[in-house]
């Protein structure tokens, strides 16, 4: 495996993904991890990430210098380069002109990490400081017109460092550099495969669970489906699944989830029909946060009451992913917590005395999708757009009523169907309808109408932290609008949401 020491970079996760793309297992750890702990973990290589600080400022994240004595290859990137240089006798200064963006880099060395690079290639720079002086033990490997030490190597130790970012796509041959480092310099053989991951996870689950029973909440989304598939493969009929239908699901969703479940699993499924309870809990509530709170609370109640009916249940499985683990600070070697609470069933395991199983906690979302395919789940399930826990409630603005949900479900089904028919479902990250708390005047036939307005929301995004509205073709928008107004009773106006995130969010509430 390779370790990435996280110095607070927004790119640390990206580095880890790029390494895994080389079929090498990679883990992100705290920057202040000791050399002793690294020796225990025995990685084949260590990558020092970038970071927002200046190494020479007081309190800036530092590295245990003994790491350089372990004889494990080290690659420093940006801040990682600066911290390595400083620890090994170089000097770092503020750059007169901050460098941000593409730069042409001259490669003086075409061995080891730069095997296959041309004499001059585009790279991506993003820094305020840079190394101004290197110790005698270092050799320059690359430079740009403003950065004399764009890349360096130690003469006797396996230590490499670069000021630019090989992990971003704006460094077109950055993948080659990372490949060279992990495969050639570190000697990783690139045999880490998701299939092997699945086999190891199955073994591990069997050992942990023994002959006890595991409960898994099912939502119809990809994460919970992959967890269920993995558990089913491991323990078969010792698995019980619970689907809470909160009445906020999309058109035919309960039926689709049950059908898919029965196609893939021959085990216990509990469907809780809780529409009435959720609707009564939401009656008269308009404030978005209060709606979410009540839904979260009702979900826990429903799940709990069903779970206690399942005899011998000992474990609760959750689809926690690696970014959640990193961001929640749950990994003892992982970077410090930035406190982002995840867990759609937060607090449940402790309250019910369950032990937690999180078989996806080492994987990124795209890896979970690939694992789902390996486990035989169908493409359309694996590539399903994400759907928020509170469901249609956050897309039915203002008070949620049964009647409004009927209108919203029909409109939403048309949006998704038309986007699928246009072959654009995989290209868009999320596409749905929102029922606005607004009536407007229209004319249908000879009669005046005073009906609801629906907003169509489609976004493209990689990480759901930022998003752009999808530039859908006008004729597709026209078909969506015509069909909603003709087919959905109670709607006489359709608008397209052309706001990006930020400053808007993807959902409307
Ligand atoms: P926003 O609206 O914050 O949404 O831009 C970002 C992504 O998160 C999803 N989302 C949720 N997912 N429970 C979830 O499981 C929630 O309460 C929730 N709220 C928003 C949203 O659909 C989008 O993909």
Image: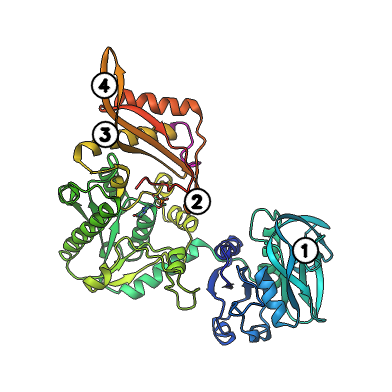
Instruction: Evaluate if marks 4 and 2 touch, with contact meaning CB atoms under 8 Å apart.
Output: no
The reply to whether the residue tagged 4 has its Cβ within 8 angstroms of ligand 1 is no
Choose between 276 and 400: the one closer to the eye.
400
Q: Earlier in the sequence, mark 1 or mark 4?
A: 1
The Cα atoms of the two marked residues, 1 and 2, are separated by: 35 Å
Q: Residue at x 45, y 72 (%)?
A: 337
Choose between 27 and 261: the one closer to the eye.
27
The Cα atoms of the two marked residues, 1 and 4, are separated by: 70 Å
Q: Earlier in the sequence, mark 4 or mark 3?
A: 3
Q: Earlier in the sequence, mark 1 or mark 3?
A: 1
Q: Nearer the viewer, mark 4 or mark 3?
A: 4
Q: Nearer the viewer, mark 1 or mark 3?
A: 3
333 in relation to 404, above or below = below
Q: Quadrant of residue 23?
A: bottom right
Q: Which residue is mark 4?
A: 449
Where does the image place residue 200, in percent across and percent down from the top left? 45, 69
Instruction: Evaluate if marks 1 and 4 touch, with contact meaning CB atoms under 8 Å apart.
Output: no
Identify the mark at residue 115; answer none if there is no mark: 1
Judged by its main secondary structure, the magenta piece is: loop
Q: Secondary structure at mark 1?
A: loop
Q: Residue at x 27, y 70 (%)?
A: 349
The reply to whether the residue tagged 3 has its Cβ within 8 angstroms of ligand 1 is no
* Left or right of residue 7: residue 278: left
Q: Secondary structure at mark 2?
A: loop
Identify the mark at residue 215; answer none if there is no mark: none
Instruction: Evaluate if marks 1 and 2 touch, with contact meaning CB atoms under 8 Å apart.
Output: no
Q: Nearer the viewer, mark 4 or mark 2?
A: 4
Q: Which residue is mark 3?
A: 407
């Amino acid at each position: 495996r390779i370790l990435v020491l996280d110095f607070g970079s927004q790119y640390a996760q990206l580095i880890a993904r790029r390494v895994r793309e080389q079929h090498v297992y990679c883990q992100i750890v705290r920057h202040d991890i000791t050399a002793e702990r690294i020796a225990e973990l025995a990685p084949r290589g260590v990558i020092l990430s970038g970071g927002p600080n200046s190494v020479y400022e007081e309190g800036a994240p530092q590295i245990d210098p003994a790491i350089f004595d372990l004889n494990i290859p080290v690659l420093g990137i940006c801040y990682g380069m600066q911290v390595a240089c400083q620890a090994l006798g170089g000097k770092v200064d503020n750059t007169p002109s901050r460098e941000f963006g593409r730069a042409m880099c001259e490669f003086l060395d075409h061995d080891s990490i730069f095997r296959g690079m041309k004499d001059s290639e585009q790279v991506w720079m993003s820094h305020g400081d840079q190394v101004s002086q290197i110790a005698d033990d270092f050799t320059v490997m690359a430079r740009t017109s403003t950065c004399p030490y764009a890349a360096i190597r130690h003469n006797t130790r396996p230590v490499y460092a670069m000021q630019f970012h090989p992990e971003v796509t704006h460094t077109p041959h950055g993948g080659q550099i990372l490949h060279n480092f992990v495969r050639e310099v570190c000697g990783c053989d690139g045999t880490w495969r998701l299939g092997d991951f699945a086999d190891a996870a199955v073994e591990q689950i069997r050992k942990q669970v023994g002959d006890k029973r595991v409960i898994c909440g099912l939502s119809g989304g990809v994460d919970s489906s992959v967890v269920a598939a993995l558990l089913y493969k491991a323990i078969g009929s010792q698995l019980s699944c619970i689907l809470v239908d909160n009445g906020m699901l999309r058109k035919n969703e309960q039926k689709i989830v049950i059908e898919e479940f029965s196609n893939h699993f021959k085990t216990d499924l509990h469907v809780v029909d809780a529409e009435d309870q959720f609707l009564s809990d939401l009656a008269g509530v308009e404030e978005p946060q209060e709606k979410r709170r009540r839904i979260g609370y009702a979900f826990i109640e429903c799940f709990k009451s069903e779970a206690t009916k399942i005899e011998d249940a000992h474990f609760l499985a959750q689809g926690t992913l690696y970014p959640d683990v990193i961001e929640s600070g749950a990994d003892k070697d992982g970077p410090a917590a930035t406190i982002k609470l995840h867990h759609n069933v937060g607090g449940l395991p402790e309250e019910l005395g369950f032990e937690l199983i999180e078989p996806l906690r080492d994987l990124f979302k795209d890896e979970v999708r690939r694992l789902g395919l390996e486990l035989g789940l169908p493409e359309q399930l694996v590539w399903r757009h994400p759907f928020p826990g509170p469901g249609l409630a956050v897309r039915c603005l203002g008070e949620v009523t049964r009647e409004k949900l009927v209108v919203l479900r029909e409109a939403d089904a048309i949006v998704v169907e038309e986007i699928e028919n246009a072959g654009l479902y995989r290209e868009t990250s999320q596409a749905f309808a929102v029922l606005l708390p607004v009536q407007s005047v229209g004319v249908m036939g000879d009669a005046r109408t005073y009906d609801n307005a629906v907003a169509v929301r489609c976004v493209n995004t990689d990480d759901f932290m930022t998003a752009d509205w999808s530039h859908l073709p006008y004729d597709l928008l026209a078909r969506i609008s015509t069909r909603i107004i003709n087919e959905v009773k109670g709607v006489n106006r359709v608008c397209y949401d052309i706001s990006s995130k930020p400053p808007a969010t993807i959902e409307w509430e």
